[in-house]
Image (spheres, helix red, strand yellow):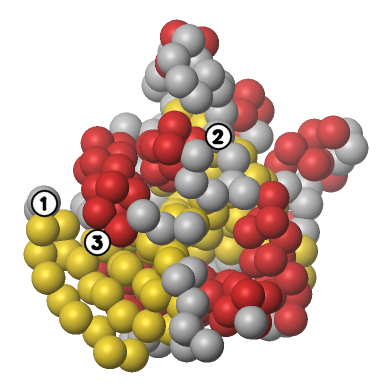
Amino acid sequence: METHHRVAVLCALPQEAEPIIEGLHGIERRRRYGTDLVTGQFGEVSVVVCVGGMGKVAAGAAAQMLICEYHPDALIFSGIAGSLNPLLEIGDIVIGRSLVYLETNNDIIAECDPFLHTYASDDHLSALVCRVLDEQGYRRVPSLAEMSAADDTDAVDATGTVSDGTGRYVLGTIATSDQFNTDPEVLDHTRRVWHGDCEEMEGAAVAHVCAKNRVPFLAVRAMSNRCGEAYEDLNRHQSDMTLAARNAGAAVLAVLRAAQIHHE
């Protein structure tokens, strides 16, 4: 039976979008408003994938365009990020329970619709992606907010974290910055004040636009590096970026598959 269920997927970079596009059939490519767009089907779900570019302005503009042009029932933001949570290794995933702007006066921003200081993924979509990650063999570990609430922060040592080969994920906080931050004091402040599990440059802007338009939103970020290394060093580890992009893309496709089953 034909369904009108539509999902928009927004990525900053082409390599973040391609693992998702590879899972679609009947694809059509076009370029509009300075973005690359691919439409296709994932089973009975109609999907539009957009490569919107890096930074908050590009991401916010692309999100609003997707909402106005394609009227999605949900918008998923997918891609890579730098890890701030010492329990997360390369390829591990952060689901954005909370998304926050750094370098911004959030009290002033919250004076306007949607009147929020921070933004959030949709509860149903968050539960769905946690379930599919569990099914894929990922192990949920504490977010920094959960560790802080449990007074376990001092018990976590990044240098003592040993990978057992099992993928990990957290339902935690995504911190959105205008900078590719490497200063240890800045990164420590993000961990302590915002309990940021990862840092990137777009997510809160996309979540903000979705909240303003009342469109259900989900953020999926896979770790391509640990925050603190220089951007030039990151570019020398293309295999880590590819792994992270593919893990995030696989999680998004699993959500689309589960959403399709849910709507049949």
Viewer-closest of 14 and 110: 110
Query: Which quadrant holds residue 112?
Result: top left
In this rendering, the label closer to the viewer, 2 or 1: 1
Secondary structure of residue under mark 1: loop
Q: Earlier in the sequence, mark 2 or mark 1?
A: 1
Residue 28, how many percent across, how many down?
Answer: 19, 81
In the image, what residue occupies the spot 40% across and 87% down?
Answer: 23
Task: Inspect the image, locate mark 2, and give the three-letter code of the amino acid beneath it.
Answer: Tyr
Which residue in the structure is indicated by mark 2?
Answer: 119
- Pointer 2 with pointer 3, Cβ within 8 A: no
Instruction: Answer whether residue 262 is visible to the viewer in this image.
Output: yes
Residue 224, how many percent across, how many down?
Answer: 44, 63
Query: How many other residues sit within 10 Å of disc 2, few (<14), some (14-19) or many (≥20)?
Result: many
Task: Inspect the image, locate mark 3, and give the three-letter code of the amino acid beneath it.
Answer: Val
Secondary structure of residue under mark 2: loop
Q: Is residue 63 above or below residue 38?
A: above
Which residue in the structure is indicated by mark 1?
Answer: 33
Residue 193, how many percent across, how many down?
Answer: 63, 24
Q: Earlier in the sequence, mark 2 or mark 3?
A: 3
Task: Inspect the image, locate mark 1, and give the three-letter code of the amino acid beneath it.
Answer: Tyr
How far apart are labels 3 and 1 at the CA level? 11 Å
In the image, what residue occupies the spot 61% across and 29% down?
Answer: 194
Which residue in the structure is indicated by mark 3?
Answer: 51
How far apart are labels 2 and 3 at the CA level? 22 Å
Q: Is residue 61 above or below residue 94?
A: above
User: Is 55 displayed left or right of 31 in the figure?
Assistant: right
In this rendering, the label closer to the viewer, 3 or 1: 1
How far apart are labels 2 and 1 at the CA level? 26 Å
